[in-house]
Amino acid sequence: MANQSKQERVPPQKGQPNGKVPAQVIFGTALEHVTLTGKCDGGKSILAKCNGSSVTIKVIENAGKCDIAVFCLDNNNKEIQNTRTKIPPGQILPIYVAPNGTDRVELECIQADLNPECKVKLAV
């Protein structure tokens, strides 16, 4: 994920008259989102810089073909215990809270055979 090949902003949309709801409409609220793409090669990307404060990230969707993990690091680059959350393909994490003492929140595309596409949608 370190080599992000694409970022796109998708404007909010209303439900379609045929009753189908666009993917970005989650929990009854239309959200803009940013899409990050890369390969499932174990690469990591920073999702949020927290500088020691608690931060809430809303709606992390794994739209790719491999598992992703979200976790927090302290200012010594050590993973903070009990902050790692794994999100399988096609699943949504509605909310992620980084605790006080977090320097940054990172995203990892878990390595998979043949390095399929890693794709993550984040609400903004």
Image: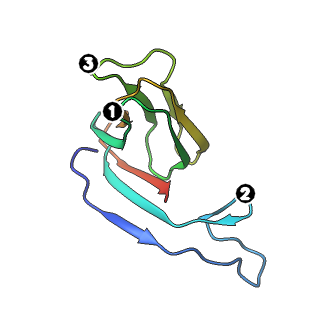
Say which residue appears at 49% left-offset and 23% top-offset: 83
**Which residue is denoted by mark 2 in the rendering?**
27
Residue at the left extreme, as displayed: 3
Residue 112 at x, y percent in the picture:
35, 35
**Which residue is denoted by mark 1 in the rendering?**
111
Tell me the CA gap for discs 3 and 1: 25 Å
**Which residue is denoted by mark 3 in the rendering?**
76
Compare residues 48 and 16 and report the one nearer the observer: 48
Residue 21 at x, y percent in the picture:
70, 71
Location of residue 75 (image quadrant): top left
Tell me the CA gap for discs 3 and 2: 37 Å
> Looking at the picture, does residue 60 appear above or below residue 104?
below
Say which residue appears at 53% left-offset and 38% top-offset: 88
User: Which secondary structure, mark 1?
Assistant: loop
Packing grade of label 1 (10 A; few <14, some 14-19, many >=20) is some
Q: Amino acid at mark 3?
A: Asn
Residue 95 at x, y percent in the picture:
60, 42
Say which residue appears at 42% left-offset and 18% top-offset: 80
Instruction: State which tag comes first along the sequence, 2 or 1.
Output: 2
- Closer to the eye: label 3 or 2: 3
